Image: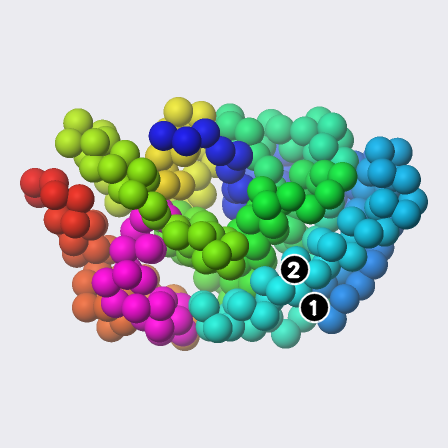
Amino acid sequence: MRAFLLAVSLGAALLTLAGVAEARARGGDGRFDARRSTHFLLRQDVAIDQRTGPSGTRQFERDVLRVLEAGYDQLDARLGLRPRRRLEVSIYDPARFDAHYARLAPFRIAGFYGGSIRVRGDVRVTPALVRTLHHELVHAAFDAVAPGLVLPGWLNEGLAEWFSARTAGLVPIGGQDFAALAQIGARGQLLPIARLSAPSFASLDAGTAPLAYLQSRALVDHLARQHGDQALRDLVRRLLRTGDVDGSLARAVGVDSAGLEAAFRDELGLAR
């Protein structure tokens, strides 16, 4: 299975860890530059200036906001999400991000959402950074539109992973991914959907987390391929209205979470 950085949505309880509240208030080094666009407030750690120079960091800010606004434009079309308030995004110097946030999970993270989008920065907008921004944008949008809604991890992370792949013009689950999942399943090592239904994957170890994210993306992609992208919009619409995951699944695609798991195993050619 390919190695990749994980963009992780962490539960609010994790933000009570020592040092996080201080970092949230002050920024990675105590200084943030702010820039606004139509739908976003971008706060960038000024330590990035030391590597890019003032002109470089201004271009970086413009590029990040362009990526975020492009993602916002696709939120409604793909998932039926349209936050009305401006979303806050903090871009940290990589070393400072790692120093403050590496302990939030036992595996390396590229970004997370906890009241605002927090991202490990770069000197330029790379494809990996674009996907991280779009992944966390989904979490921020759900929180803005329905702050009390708690989704199972497989759906929360699966939608974010699926969206970030689709907005990048990528196939969410390619042939190599499908083959890897089939092989893992044949060995009896797929994670049961009950385990994937915890609100957060933050407690998973570094060996289990990549599989949890891959399976979650695959489950959402299965829904989209079998029932059409419109089914995801319908599912999200029902979730926002009722908060009932299994009921929304049943009405949008005709199966609950257990039925989805069974259908996905059938697609992989696995015995039930």
Q: What element carries label 2?
A: helix
From this view, report whether residue 88 is shown above or below residue 186: below
Front-lying residue, 56 or 90 = 56
From this view, report whether residue 160 is shown above or below residue 235: above
Q: Residue 180: image x %, image y %?
A: 27, 34
**Closer to the eye: label 2 or 1:** 2
Quadrant for residue 49, please give it. Answer: top right
Q: Residue at x 31, y 62 (%)?
A: 224
Left or right? Give the position of 140 relative to 243.
right
Q: What element carries label 1?
A: loop
Q: Residue 48: image x %, image y %?
A: 82, 38
Question: Which comes before the other along the chain, label 2 or label 1?
Answer: 1
Left or right? Give the position of 69 relative to 185.
right
For residue 230: magenta?
A: yes
Reading the image, the residue beneath label 1 is 39
Reading the image, the residue beneath label 2 is 68
Q: Residue 246 carries which label?
A: none
Q: Do the residues labelled 2 and 1 touch (CB within 8 Å)?
A: yes
Say what amino acid the circle numbered 2 marks: Leu
Which residues are drawn in magenta? 216-239
User: Which quarter of the image is occupied by the C terminus?
Assistant: top left
